[in-house]
Image (cartoon, rainbow, N blue to C red):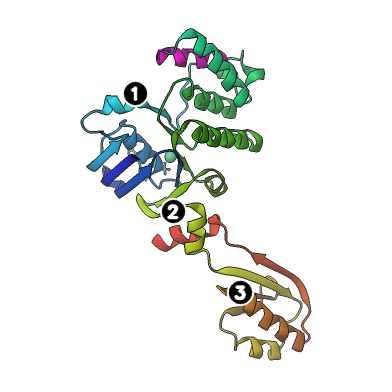
Amino acid sequence: MLCIETKNLRKKYASTVAVDSIDLQIESGQVFGFLGPNGAGKSTVIKLLTTLISPSNGEISVLGIDSSKHPLEIRKKIGVVLQQPSYEPTLSAEKSLDKYGMMWNIDKKTRKKRTEELLSAFGLEEIRKKKMEDLSIGQRRRVQVAREFMHNMELLFLDEPTVGLDPTARRKLLDFLRDQVKKSGLTIFYTTHVLSEAEYLCDNIAIINNGKIMAVDSPSELKNRFGHEKTIKIHISTVSEELKLKLSKIPECQIKLEPEPTVVITSTKSEIVLMNILKILNETETKINDLSAIPTNLEEIFLKVVGDSN
Ligand SMILES: Nc1ncnc2c1ncn2[C@@H]1O[C@H](COP(=O)(O)OP(=O)(O)O)[C@@H](O)[C@H]1O
Ligand SMILES: [Mg+2]
């Protein structure tokens, strides 16, 4: 089933086109990543999809509901954690969860059970009695995400939820989210500018830049599509004229002299090119100081995709 569908979605703020003709088709039961640099339009898309703002043009359907006709129906079925902090300063972490459950009409027994589960799952047991205003940014953020799970929802929107979290808390959150999707068929729309996170968590990723979608695919397909090229760097001690001459006959490599003499191979068949170059280095008695291969990761793909569109 399609969980989110947009057609020609656009949002303009005065002279800024924040979202530019976005067509999305997102299947349910997955974590869908929305990956892009600051200002790309991620938060604007979340606000549009959660009916908090209206589009300038285009159509939005969420859980099969037309957002221009029945925005409240959509809001009843979704959870949202926006980037802006939202909490009652004097409420304790556990009260904050409980109160949120009350707002969603969850019965007392279920609230109690869920509060315990969530405090444990989010590593918040030790600070459960602390007031929200006394928590660190990361702790508050965790309470904010945790409380969304007090109610039953089909679709959850998270706008850069890991900002301010330390690596352990971050990993714990990502694993919790994965687990929820697997267990309950929940769909999560997840924005981030952190590539490793998108790669770890998401089933599919849309790369967004300047309000436009540059690519949509699974992390491994994105790597296949954009990641055939590999870079190998060979740091050498000296560069002789003979070496320069011989290397100039190999098209897919170049010599850099600064900051240290380096032969750089950028090729889709970098291993084969490497063999030829090692032979030449041997013939010219060039000493190799160090050799490094840079595998293609999503970060390089991201920079390439975003860079190409600027
Ligand atoms: N309320 C607003 N008024 C004017 N411009 C805005 C507003 N909200 C966002 N923008 C602009 O729209 C663009 C996209 O912003 P945003 O969706 O917040 O990006 P992201 O979440 O990817 O960092 C940016 O250029 C931003 O400055
Ligand atoms: Mg944002």
Q: Is residue 48 left or right of residue 132?
A: left
Give x and y (percent) for residue 174.
Answer: 57, 37
- The amino acid type found where label 1 is placed reads Lys
Report which quarter residue 83 is drawn in.
top left
Magenta-colored stretch includes residue 52: no
Rate crowding at label 1 as few (under 14), some (14 to 19) or many (20 or more) other CA atoms within 10 Å. few
Q: Earlier in the sequence, mark 1 or mark 2?
A: 1
Q: Which residue is mark 1?
A: 76
Give x and y (percent) for residue 34.
Answer: 43, 45
Rate crowding at label 3 as few (under 14), some (14 to 19) or many (20 or more) other CA atoms within 10 Å. some
Spatial separation of the CA atoms under disc 1 and disc 2: 29 Å
Q: Which residue is mark 3?
A: 270
Please state the extent of the stretch shown in magenta in the rendering. Answer: 91-105
Spatial separation of the CA atoms under disc 1 and disc 3: 53 Å
Give x and y (percent) for residue 2.
Answer: 34, 41
Q: Is residue 96 left or right of residue 169?
A: left
Q: Which residue is mark 2?
A: 217
Q: Earlier in the sequence, mark 3 or mark 2?
A: 2
Magenta-colored stretch includes residue 104: yes
